[in-house]
Amino acid sequence: MGNWIANHWFSAVVLIAWLGINIFLFIYYFMIYETQEQYAYTRVILGSALAWARGSAACLNFNCLIILLPVCRNLLSFLRGTCSCCRRSVRKLLDNNLAFHKILGYTIALMTAVHTIAHLFNVERFYDGAQSSNKTLEGMLSSIGSEKEDWVNPIRSKNETQSYICFTTIAGVTGVVITLALILMITSSTEFIRRCYFEVFWYTHHLFIIFFAGLLIHGVGRIVRGQTTASLSSNSYDACHEKYTVWKEKGSRDGGEDDEDDDDDHKNQCFMPSFQGNDPMTWKWIIAPIIIYILERFLRFCRSQQRVVIIKTVSHPSKVLEIQMQKRGFRMEVGQYIFINCPSVSRLEWHPFTLTSAPEEDMFSVHIRSAGDWTESLIKIFHEMADNPPRLEVDGPFGTASEDVFKYEVSMLVGAGIGVTPFASILKSIWYKLQNEDHRLKTKKIYFYWICRETGAFAWFADLLRSLEQEMITSGKDGFLNYRLFLTSWDSSIAGHAIINFDVATDAVTGLKQKTSYGRPIWENEFSSVADAHPRSTVGVFLCGPQALGKTLQQCCHQYSSMDPRKVQFYFNKENF
């Protein structure tokens, strides 16, 4: 528990503050529209649904204000750089950007549902008021302003229906468009859709442009109205709402204006109330983040237009393609990722890939596994155009949690399948640091775990591990890296081959000194042994892999961290794209 608090307290504070602001805004605006006198006559027609609509609208404005910021990747990379010397809990907040973005999205969906349902009640009440006779207060209020813009009920004729309001007014049309766009974005953002049909998620998520465009003009029609300040002086709700049958038209009065008795009578008379719509507020909330996001996209567009030189491509087993590139002014850190677009495959789609090169190298590289239509088409084109590879556009690099790997005394790196790619960059950088005898290296020990389903996946990474083995022996640091390879799927021939070569110095599958383990790691044993070996160290646990594995590792981090802050502490970090 102590470890969780130390690692997440800042994120918890931000989340509590966000929740508190939402609650405050909802209650504040709810009470304004439920209690203030200027909306008293509006409440006569609409009831409490007005306050529910306005309270949820305030929450929508606030959440739409911040939902774009967690996906401004250049902004996050800048903040991560400026926070490099900050506490771990502050940097942890930036690593949870996508989780916060999802929370904001679901909150917007919830508040949209409340706002929409409340306004559906409002439309129905507006219609009922328009159908009422002037002998009722609702009917009298609905008849006000037939020829002027001081009405309170937007339904100006008994022939107008609820559908007419929903599909002909600015608020109605934009509300329908915004809601449909939001439904499509939310439903296509599920884990299954993003993993199996990324293109569907990619294209539908760009409906946010329509969503925000609709928000900007949603309140222009000023349908929700309150009594004007001048009208309040001549028609107070408390004094006049029961006298609606004798309300006088504005400007009419009996007797001369100089007659003092007439003035006293005039003060006791109730005149027809006048109403006006509130100034649109949503654009004031969202214009700043929209400008920031536009600048973000403009910067990314300019950077993506810089020429990328493909210097080498390598085909690896398990349908993995390695692309080595160069780009002027490109600077990276370990564990970072880039977005790649191949116009020959799709001009609009950009996909994230972790960099597998080290900062010390004069090029940058990615390893792309065939895992969908886009990656399959990309690999196919590169095979067909081996002598003249297609043009690529690159945006990035962007920061991730893996940048902090060298800030820990001990690091545990866990990769599953192609999820090993960020650790390729880290291990290569370690190789260069060992060669150059970099004394600034704080890390004293690294534990590396790679979990794969098939032996072919080990092939492209084995050369790097083999060179690391040799370099550590040469530099006298053969205990610096402890790596374990786990094969989770095998047939009888592989098992037989392993048994026959049991006494051989190198592994039968990889050719490395470290033998391959068959099955999955028992994480309780792994964490226990690391805790025993480093009883007073800070251990960073880094994962690039499935969510289920992340939950297991996070539980182990909490379980094996000591309550004493001076003893071993495990801190969990996961890659998020």
Image (spheres, grey):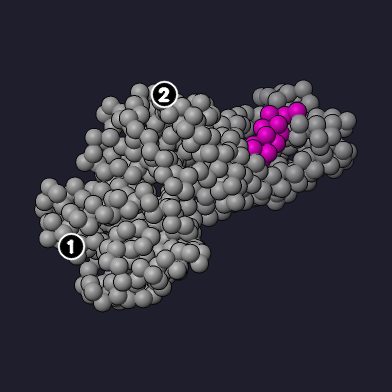
Queried whether the magenta region covers residue 458, the answer comes back as: no
The numbered dot on residue 145 is: none
Residue range (magenta): 168-181
What's the residue at 36%, 48% (across, down)? 460
Q: Is residue 290 above or below residue 543?
A: above
Residue 225: image location, x then y, percent: 66, 36
What's the residue at 26%, 48% (across, down)? 428
Q: Residues within 10 Å of mark 1 (few under 14, many from 20)?
A: some
Residue type beneath disc 1: Asp
Q: Is residue 20 visible?
A: no
The quadrant the N terminus occupies is: bottom left
Q: Which residue is under mark 2?
A: 388
Residue 46: image location, x then y, percent: 74, 45
What's the residue at 23%, 54% (across, down)? 468
Q: Main secondary structure of the magenta part?
A: helix
Q: Is residue 130 above or below residue 407?
A: above
Residue type beneath disc 2: Asn
The numbered dot on residue 478 is: 1
Q: Residues within 10 Å of mark 2 (few under 14, many from 20)?
A: few
* Image position of 131 (left or right of 84): right
* Image position of 151 (left or right of 104): right
* Image position of 321 (left or right of 376): left
Asked where in the image residue 391 lies, by quadrant, the reply is top left
